[in-house]
Image: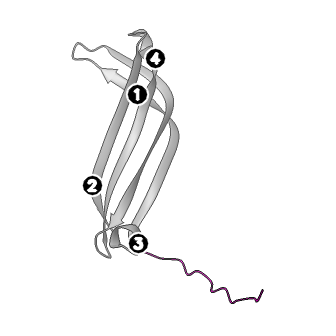
Amino acid sequence: MTGGNIAPVEPIVVETPLVNNSDPCVGLGYGLCMQMNDNGSSYSESCIQYGGGFSVSATDNVDVFLDYTRFYDDSGFDTLTSNDNSVIGFTDGASYKF
């Protein structure tokens, strides 16, 4: 049996503008979620809040972003109900770098 040469495998790299110009982000914190009613009453709960998103560089000075945040995910919102409740939010926008 004779030996042979084994050629190294080169990785395939796919470059796309969306991947190369984007930055993911995640967030975790503790905050207050509040419900205010027209009659002046209000209810609130504090809880862990978390989310994630990404930004994409549109130009050298402009970034566009999209974020998802779960503000509340628990049961019994300030004794209003014993059901499971969730409060989520999406944020989108643009930022300019001077």
The amino acid sitting under disc 3 is Asn
Tag 2 near tag 3, CB within 8 Å: no
Which residue: 70% across, 89% down? 4
Q: CA distance from mark 1 to mark 4?
A: 13 Å
Q: Which residue is mark 1?
A: 33
Residue type, mark 1 in image: Cys
Q: Is residue 20 above or below residue 25?
A: below
Residue span colored magenta: 1-14
Point out the tag, 1 or 4, that comes first from the N-terminus: 1
Q: Which residue is mark 3?
A: 20
Q: Residue at x 39, y 65 (%)?
A: 22
Q: Residue at x 43, y 10 (%)?
A: 82
Q: Amino acid at mark 4?
A: Ser
Mark identifier at residue 93: 2
Whichever of labels 3 and 1 marks the residue nearer the N terminus, that label is 3
**Residue 5 part of the magenta-drawn span:** yes
Measured Cα–Cα span from mark 3 to mark 1:
36 Å
Between disc 3 and disc 1, the foreground one is: 3
Based on the displayed image, in which of its 4 quarters is residue 9 positioned? bottom right
> Would you identify the image quadrant in which residue 73 lies?
top left
The residue depicted at 36 percent of the width and 34 percent of the height is 88
**As drawn, 71 above or below 63:** above
Q: Which label sits in the foreground, 2 or 4?
A: 4
Q: Nearer the viewer, residue 45 or 19?
A: 19
**Residue 12 place in picture, x, y as percent:** 48, 77
Front-most of residues 18 and 71: 18
Instruction: State which tag comes first along the sequence, 2 or 1.
Output: 1
